[in-house]
Amino acid sequence: MKSEEYKTEWCLLQNQFDSYEKHSLYIKLVSILALVATVISDAAGVSVVLILLVLWLQDAIWKTFQSRIEMRLLQLEKSIMEENSGDAFQFNSHFQSIRPGGLSLIGEYLNQSIRPTVAFPHIALIVISLVINMVQFNQ
């Protein structure tokens, strides 16, 4: 019986995990669109860089949520493989027991932000924005 509960929870969480990945991609696409819109409107400036930084941090926060689901998925997969009689359907309890607070939570967000799959597109967009700003400033 427990095995079926684990499998049900795993399916639910795996779908949510995949959904977080799609939403992270949407954040990256919004960043690209924001940069393109400022280039088209000739409105590049420091504010664009700040907006791109906020979107980068939002992506990191989103990926932090996703990583918490990943931890539970790995725990479920281990329980399914070992046929343990642990606690199925305990995602929120598990999350509450490991959730950091204050500065640790901010540190967790920052750690997610420097992961290559999160950082690369945001850094590239910020560099492009800075180059555009320098070109416009020199004209």
Image (cartoon, rainbow, N blue to C red):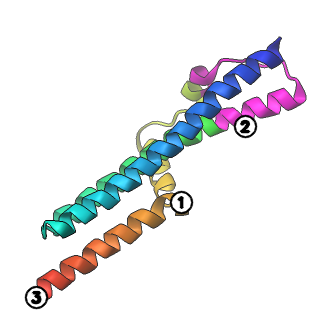
* Residue 12 horizontal/vertical position (percent): 63, 25
The three-letter amino acid code for the residue at tag 1 is: Thr
Prevailing SS of the magenta stretch: helix
| Tag 1 near tag 2, CB within 8 Å | no
Q: Which residue is mark 1?
A: 117
* Residue farthest to the front, as pictured: 40
Q: Residues within 10 Å of mark 2 (few under 14, many from 20)?
A: few
Decide which of tag 1 and tag 3 comes sooner along the chain.
Answer: 1
Left or right: 55, with 137 as reference point: right
Query: Residue 30 placed where, x, y %?
Result: 33, 53
* Relative side of 9 to 128, left or right: right
| Residue found 27% across the figure and 72% down from its top | 129
Element type where label 1 sits in the image: helix
Label 3 CA crowd tier, 10 Å (few <14, some 14–19, many 20+): few
Q: Residue at x 53, y 45 (%)?
A: 21
- Tell me which numbered mark, 3 or 2, is placed earlier along the sequence: 2
Q: Residue 61's quadrant in the figure?
A: top left
In the image, residue 134 sits, relative to residue 66, either above or below, namely: below
Give the residue pinned by disc 3.
139
Of residues 119 and 17, the one nearer the viewer is 17
Of marks 3 and 2, the one in the foreground: 3
**Alpha-carbon span between mark 1 and mark 3:** 35 Å
Crowd rating for badge 1 (residues with CA inside 10 Å; few <14, some 14–19, many 20+):
few
Q: Name which residue type carries label 2.
A: Leu
Task: Please name the residue that numbered disc 2 is placed on.
Answer: 74
Image quarter (top left, top right, bottom left or bottom right) of the N terminus: top right
Residue 32, label in figure: none
Q: Quadrant of the C terminus?
A: bottom left
State the image quarter where residue 56 is shown. bottom left
